[in-house]
């Protein structure tokens, strides 16, 4: 999905894992529940940042 690709392309985040996707019903307006695990990477500081 677009959301997962954005997470994968973010240099501040690592190891995005999506699991346990459930729908509340078969209707088009159903709520989707999911579990997302993600890690934070250490971003290098740019010159002048403290």
Image (spheres, rainbow, N blue to C red):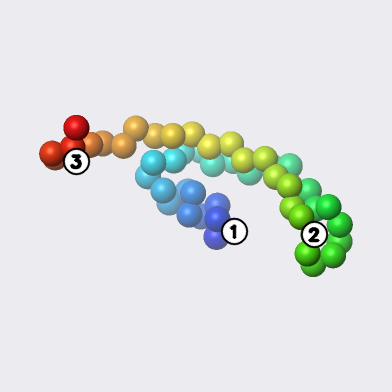
Q: Compare marks 1 and 3 and give the one earlier in the sequence.
A: 1
Q: What is the x, y in percent for residue 28?
A: 79, 67
C-alpha separation, residue under disc 1 versus residue under disc 3: 31 Å
Does dot 1 land on a helix, a strand or a loop? loop
| Alpha-carbon span between mark 2 and mark 1 | 18 Å
Return the mark for residue 30.
2
Give the residue displayed 49% in from the left and 49% down from the top: 7
Disc 2, disc 3: CB below 8 Å? no
Residue 45 located left or right of residue 29: left
Q: Residue 1 appears in which quarter of the rendering?
A: bottom right
Q: Residue at x 19, y 32 (%)?
A: 50
Q: Tell me: residue 39, above or below residue 11.
A: above
Q: Which of 14/46 is in front?
A: 46
10 Å crowding of disc 2: few (<14), some (14-19), many (20+)? few
- For label 3, the SS is loop
Residue 30 horizontal/vertical position (percent) = 79, 59
Report which residue position mark 3 lands on.
Answer: 46
Left or right of residue 26, residue 10 in this image = left
* Residue 12 at x, y percent in the picture: 39, 41
Mark 2 or 3: in front is 2
- Identify the disc placed on residue 1: 1
Element carrying mark 2: loop
Residue at horizontal 84 percent and vertical 65 percent from the top: 27
Q: Nearer the viewer, residue 19 or 28?
A: 28
Which residue is at 55% across, 55% downward? 3
């Amino acid at each position: 999905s677009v959301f997962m690709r954005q997470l994968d392309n973010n240099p501040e985040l690592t190891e995005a894992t999506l699991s346990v996707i459930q729908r509340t019903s078969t209707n088009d307006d159903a709520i989707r529940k999911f579990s997302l695990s993600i890690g934070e990477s250490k971003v290098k500081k740019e010159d002048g940042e403290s």
